[in-house]
Amino acid sequence: MVQWAWKGYSEYAYGHDSLNVKTYKGTGLPDHDMALTLVDALDTLYLVGMFDEFDRASEWVANNMEQRIFLSGFISFFETTIRLMGGLLSSYYMSGHVHLLTIANKLGMALSPAFEVYEHGVPAKDFDIVTKHTRAAPSLAEVGTLQMEFKYLARLTGYPKYHDQVERISDSWLLSGKKDDKFKTQYMTAVDGITDKLLGKSKPNGFVFIGELVYGKFEPKMDHLVCFVPGMLALGYQNGMPEEHLTLAKQLMETCYQMYAQMEAKLAPEIMYFNMKENVEEDLLVSATDAFNLLRPETVESLMVLYRVTKDEKYREYGREIMKAFEKNCRLERGGYASIGNVAKGPIHIGFRNEMESFFIAETLKYLFLLFSDDSMLPLDKIVFNTEAHPFPIEKNDS
């Protein structure tokens, strides 16, 4: 699958943000195309043994990436950090190609002024690297993850400013080698809040889900994005969290799987609603406007972690079913994969969005590969994945 996805991108969109699956041309931000798919996919290419393709892409980065960074035009600070910086750093970690770290450091220096725009130190949503102008209010959900990339960059370069800037925002217990229990406490508080305020159970079959609080009212709605939580909880259990966290992880994992299995296309919609009323036959309710699949990674990410933690073969079987559904519904004749609409009842609509998102190779296909790999392949006690599935080594605890 990685080879076919890369074939579509490399033959028709090389050096652009993404492949337009309708025109079979490259597409990207009009003013600031930064070759997102190329950089985002680097570590996946290396991981699966596509070394010729990796070397060619790594050479492209060496020759072109600095120029792409220093273009004027607004970019998403969050996406640029998790996809580009994350991809550069993890590819350096895996391959040892020094120029990847050099470019990551130049990107870090280009992004660093965004932390200084506001007194509170939180970057705006969009940032122009050349003019230093910002656009759109900061998003705490996005900036809360940025510490991983900047702290790892600080470790590699010895430049403490990267660390200090993100230290004001948040931190990561695992990446620090479990050295600071305050972050462990924050994590446990967050999980307690989920279980106390956001858990629901559907009827008639009792699927456990994480709903939303909207102005104090519980809404039985769960986005596919939430399906990273089972993996998060299982990883927490592996690192000393209580057993009830693993129990909840298994319950949520089953719900996320059912979001696939009960659709006609065997692929989950973007948003699922859950029935909580008596005398209704179906647990899962899908709006026609939400019945699209963007090739997202969250469910297969959690399947990979749950399998490694529990060794329950059903998680690999669930992954096989999802792979088959991607192949049946999303694979394109000339290379690449497309998002689809009408997953619930069909007929499916190929190319719901124009782009093959970079996260399909960077995350979805990487996690599927790891689901069927030996535990020694990026072991979960040695590395931690950033938001975009880029692996960083856990800091050694020498104390």
Image (cartoon, rainbow, N blue to C red):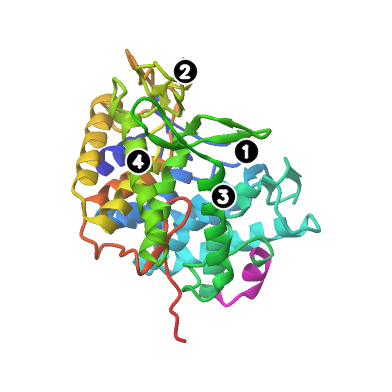
Image position, residue 239 (x, y; %): 39, 66
Q: Secondary structure at mark 2?
A: loop
Is residue 362 something one can see in this rendering? no
Image position, residue 310 (x, y; %): 25, 56
Q: Nearer the viewer, mark 1 or mark 2?
A: 2
Q: Residues within 10 Å of mark 1 (few under 14, many from 20)?
A: few
Identify the residue under disc 4: 10
Identify the residue under disc 1: 31
Q: Secondary structure at mark 3?
A: helix
Q: Residues within 10 Å of mark 3 (few under 14, many from 20)?
A: few
Distance from the alpha carbon under mark 4 to that under mark 3 = 45 Å
Distance from the alpha carbon under mark 2 to that under mark 3 = 28 Å
Q: State the residue in front, 149 or 108.
A: 149
- Specify the amino acid type for callout 1: Asp
Assess whether residue 158 is covered by the magenta stretch.
yes
Identify the residue under disc 3: 193
Q: Which residues are magenta?
A: 157-166
- Specify the amino acid type for callout 3: Gly
Q: Nearer the viewer, mark 3 or mark 1?
A: 3
- Specify the amino acid type for callout 2: Ser
Instruction: Give the mark nearer the N terminus: 3 vs 1.
Output: 1
Q: Secondary structure at mark 1?
A: loop
The rendered magenta stretch, by its main secondary structure, is classed as helix
Distance from the alpha carbon under mark 1 to that under mark 2 = 35 Å
Distance from the alpha carbon under mark 4 to that under mark 2 = 35 Å
Identify the residue under disc 2: 287
